[in-house]
Image (cartoon, helix red, strand yellow):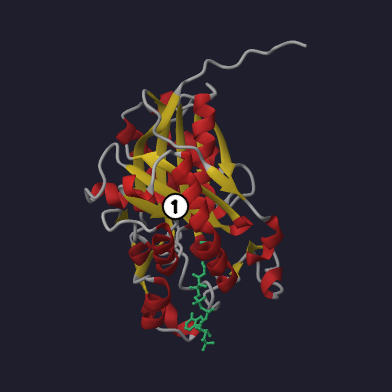
Amino acid sequence: MINLPTADLHTHSGITGLGAYRPERVVSNDELASRIDSSDQWIRERTGIIERRFATAEEDVVTMGTHAGLEAIRDAKIDPSEIDVVIVATFTHKYQTPSASAEIAHLVGAVNASAFDLGAACAGFTYGIGVSDGLIRSGNAKNILLVGSEKISDFTDFDDRGTAFLFADGAGAAVISATDVQGIGPTVWGADGSSRDAIIMAPDSIAAGLQGVPSMLTMQGQQVFRWAVGSMGEICERALSAANITADDLVAFVPHQANLRITDALIKRLHLPDSVVIARDVTTSGNTSSASIPLALDTLRKSGSVRSGDPVLMIGFGAGLAFAAQVALVP
Ligand code: UT7
C-alpha cells in the first residue's frame, strides 16, 4: 500500500485577529412587543435583552461578514492574499449556492483562498474554530478567515411570540493562523439530529404548522432552554479539562449569547469564580446565532476586560442540536 505524504505540518494554531460588524439600526423591546402581546419588562426578565440591531434592506450576510472580516484581517496584520481558506458560518445567507464565503473571499481580497460555508447554526463559530485548528495543524492552511454572519430578521416571523424578540443581526470574524504556541484547546463537540424540530427553518415551517409561510425560523423555546441548561455545563467542563485547566485559570467565559438566564445557569453549574469576566453581549445585541461569540469576545477585548494571551472558554449551541466548546487565548 502506498503511504501518501501529509502536507507540511504546522505545530500550533491560534486566533490572531478579531473583527465585528453591528448594523446601525437599534431596535427596542417596545418596538417588537406590541405585535406579540409582550412587554419590555417580560423580554428583559426572560432573556436579559434590552435592545438588538437589525440590518437594513441593503445589508446582508455578505456585506456584514465582509466588514467584520476586513477588520479581523487588519487586526491580524496580514495581507488578504496570505489567507488560504475563508469559512463562513451562517444559516441566513440568501442563496443556497454559491456560498457566502466565496463572495466574502472575493470582497476582502483573499485572492488565494478556498472558501466554504459551515452549517452548524448557533454552534457555527466554535465549530469553525475546531475545523480551522485542524486545517492549520495538518498543514493544509496557514491563515484562515472565519466569519459568523447572520441576518436573522429576514427569517423571523414577527408575529411569533417564541422568537420575534430573541434573534438579531450582525457579524463577527476571527483570523486563525499558524503560531509559535498553541492558542486553541481541543474542541469538544457533537450534535443530536433526533431533535431536528427543536429549532427549524423549513420551507413550510412544518414544525409550527404554519403552512405556506416560507422559510421562517421556529423554535421550541422551552425544550432548547432545558437542553442548554441541562447539558452544556458538562460540555464546558470537558473543554476545560481537555485544555488542562480549571475554572480558576479562566479569565473570561464567552458562551453563545442565547439568553442571559442560560448564561447565568452555566456560571452556577461551572462554579466560576467572581474574577472570571462574563460576556453579556446579548443585552444589547440580542441572539445573533453564529455571530454572537465573536461579537461578544470583541466587545470584551475592545473594552479592555480581556487582554492578549488570556484564556477564554467559548461554547456554541443551537439548532441541530449542535454544540462545540473550546478554550482559546485572546489575540
Ligand atoms: O440560539 C439558539 C438556541 N436558542 C436558545 O437557547 C433559546 C432557548 N429558549 C429561551 O431562551 C426561552 O425558552 C424563551 C426566551 C424563548 C422563552 O422563555 P420561557 O421562559 O421559556 O417562556 P415560556 O415559553 O416558558 O413561557 C412562559 C410564560 C407563559 O405564560 P404562563 O403560561 O406562565 O402564564 C407564556 O404564555 O410566558 C408567556 N410568554 C410570553 N409572555 C410575553 C411566552 N412568550 C411570551 C412573550 N411575551 N413573547
**Does residue 193 appear left or right of residue 89 in this picture?**
right
Q: Give the residue displayed 63% in from the left and 62% down from the top.
A: 201
- Tell me if residue 88 comes above or below residue 110 in the rendering: below
Quarter placement of the C terminus: top left
Q: Give the residue displayed 59% in from the left and 53% down from the top.
A: 322
Residue at numbered disc 1: 291
Quarter placement of the N terminus: top right
The quadrant holding residue 73 is: top left
Is residue 113 visible in this depiction of the protein?
A: no
Mark 1 secondary-structure assignment: helix
- Tell me if residue 92 comes above or below residue 216 in the rendering: above
Q: Give the residue displayed 55% in from the left and 77% down from the top.
A: 160
**Does residue 283 appear left or right of residue 287 in this picture?**
left
Three-letter amino acid code of the residue under disc 1: Ala
User: Which residue occupies the extreme left position in the image?
Assistant: 304
- Tell me if residue 116 comes above or below residue 215 in the rendering: above
Query: Residue 327: image x %, image y %?
Result: 42, 42
